[in-house]
Image (tube, rainbow, N blue to C red):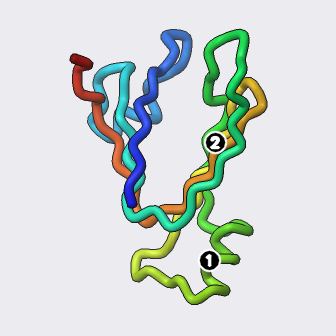
């Protein structure tokens, strides 16, 4: 399973973390490939637009430990991406790979 998120980088935020991935626009596509677990706690009512407060790529976590205990062991290993959002929501994605690119233009 794969999951793609389209993220708009706020004009007040630095583009530096994404420049090494060849990203040139503030609208980026982040694709999580070979997902093993996706866990969400999304608050669906917000009075303003939700923003990513923190994005942590983790090589060790409770989710990775749990998957490993159940026999999951991909050759490339896991990366746990933990997103904390400004309105209190959270999103956890355990995947083998992630790719980042400019998002395609919307139709």
Quadrant where the N terminus lies?
A: bottom left
> Callout 1: helix, strand or loop?
helix
Disc 1 and disc 2 in contact, CB within 8 angstroms: no
Residue 65 shown left or right of residue 104 in the figure: right
Which residue is depicted at the point 71% across and 21% down? 45
Residue 99 shown left or right of residue 74 in the figure: left
Q: Label 1 belongs to which residue? A: 67
Q: Residue furthest front?
A: 44
> Callout 2: helix, strand or loop?
strand
Q: State the image quarter where residue 76 is shown.
A: bottom left
- From what the image shows, is residue 32 above or below residue 10? below
* Residue 35 percent location from the top left of the image: 46, 62
Quadrant where the C terminus lies?
A: top left
* Residue 44 percent location from the top left of the image: 68, 27
The residue nearer to you, when weighing 38 against 9, is: 38
Which residue is depicted at the point 72% across and 25% down? 86
Count of picture labels: 2
Which residue is depicted at the point 46% across and 35% down? 17
Which residue is depicted at the point 36% across and 29% down? 28
- First in sequence: mark 1 vs mark 2: 1
Dot 1 surroundings within 10 Å: few (below 14), some, or many (20 or more)?
Answer: some
* Residue 106 percent location from the top left of the image: 26, 19
- Tell me, for residue 83, which label it has, or none: 2
- Tell me, for residue 49, which label it has, or none: none
Dot 2 surroundings within 10 Å: few (below 14), some, or many (20 or more)?
Answer: some
The residue nearer to you, when weighing 19 against 33, is: 33
* Residue 43 percent location from the top left of the image: 72, 31
């Amino acid at each position: 399973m794969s999951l793609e998120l389209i993220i708009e980088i706020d004009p007040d935020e630095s583009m530096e973390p994404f420049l090494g991935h060849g990203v040139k626009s503030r609208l980026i596509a982040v694709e999580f490939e070979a997902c093993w677990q996706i866990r969400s706690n999304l608050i669906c009512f917000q009075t303003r637009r939700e923003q990513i407060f923190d994005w942590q790529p983790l090589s060790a976590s409770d989710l990775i430990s749990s998957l490993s205990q159940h026999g999951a062991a991909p050759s490339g290993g896991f990366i746990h991406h933990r997103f904390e959002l400004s309105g209190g929501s959270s999103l956890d994605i355990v995947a083998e790979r992630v790719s980042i690119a400019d998002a395609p233009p919307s139709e």
